[in-house]
Amino acid sequence: MATAVPKPTISASEWEARQQLAACYRVFDHLGWSELIYNHITLRVPEEENAFLINPFGLLYSEVTASNLVKIDIDGHVLDGSPYPVNRAGFTQHSIFHRHLPDAHCIIHTHTTAGMAVSATQEGLTATNFYAAAFIDRIAYHDFEGVTIRPEEGERLIAHLGARRIMMLRNHGTLVMAKSLPQAFLTQWMLQRACEIQVATGAAGTPVEIPPDVIAVHQRDLSGVQLPAGPGVPDFEAMVRRIDRIDPGWRG
């Protein structure tokens, strides 16, 4: 049974972050992006430079709540007295980016079927659909080195990422990082759609490549079709409303 962390020990800003992250886990579960008890979405705790929230290792995404998220430091040490462990393989990878990238407030790692399939191809993501066009020349690639529990891999991960904030872990899955959770969510949603459509296109026939000049125009104009609330905010809020109608228990 999921165990809650006592609310009195949590500040208002941390509680808001906990609710946002718990909602995100439930959204991922609803969309079929969970992987049993594995994979992670991490979020920096507001007003605390080296404190992060992560899912309790052993719980399904559908069991994550605001209270049972685990608060850890940059080295993965539990800060809130949580009875749950943290998946070492998961946070080793996330801590590298949180440590070195001040703008990586939210990091998402998934093993979706479409994401893993595209990551396992020589071509990676190709310019063959509406969503993929947004990511051309904006994705980094890192070759598979086995399960991520060795800190020395971090130097190569950072080097391969460079100035980008989206990474295909070859033969493994995808990584998305952003300045906010809603922005990371929308990026993940678009990347997932791009991968799904690419896989379907390959089964349907010969893919048609989008010309580079069209891609440039597409990327330039994308911001013009967004609502002013901020990147991903209305999209994420819409999904939270859907999750609330299914089970609002994540809020507690």
Image: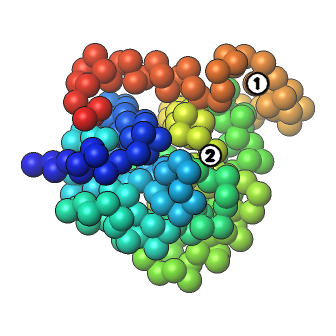
Q: Identity of the amino acid at label 2?
A: Ala
Residue named by callout 2: 178
Residue at 29%, 32% (x, y): give it: 251
Spatial CA distance of label 2 from label 1 is 16 Å
> Foreground residue, 193 or 34?
34
> Foreground residue, 188 or 171?
188
> Foreground residue, 123 or 95?
95
Q: Identity of the amino acid at label 1?
A: Ser
Q: Look at the image and tell me whether residue 205 can be seen.
A: no
| Residue 122: image location, x then y, percent | 62, 58
Q: Look at the image and tell me whether residue 151 can be seen.
A: yes
In the image, residue 39 sits, relative to residue 184, either above or below, namely below
Mark sitting earlier along the chain (2/1) = 2
Quarter occupied by the C terminus: top left
- Frontmost of labels 2 and 1 is 2
| Residue 124: image location, x then y, percent | 63, 51
Return the mark for residue 223. 1
Return the mark for residue 81. none
Quadrant in the picture for residue 19:
top left
Residue at 45%, 67% (x, y): give it: 73
In the image, residue 197 sits, relative to residue 159, either above or below, namely above
Q: How is the image coloured?
A: rainbow
**Secondary structure found at label 1:** helix
Residue 109 relative to residue 190: left or right: left
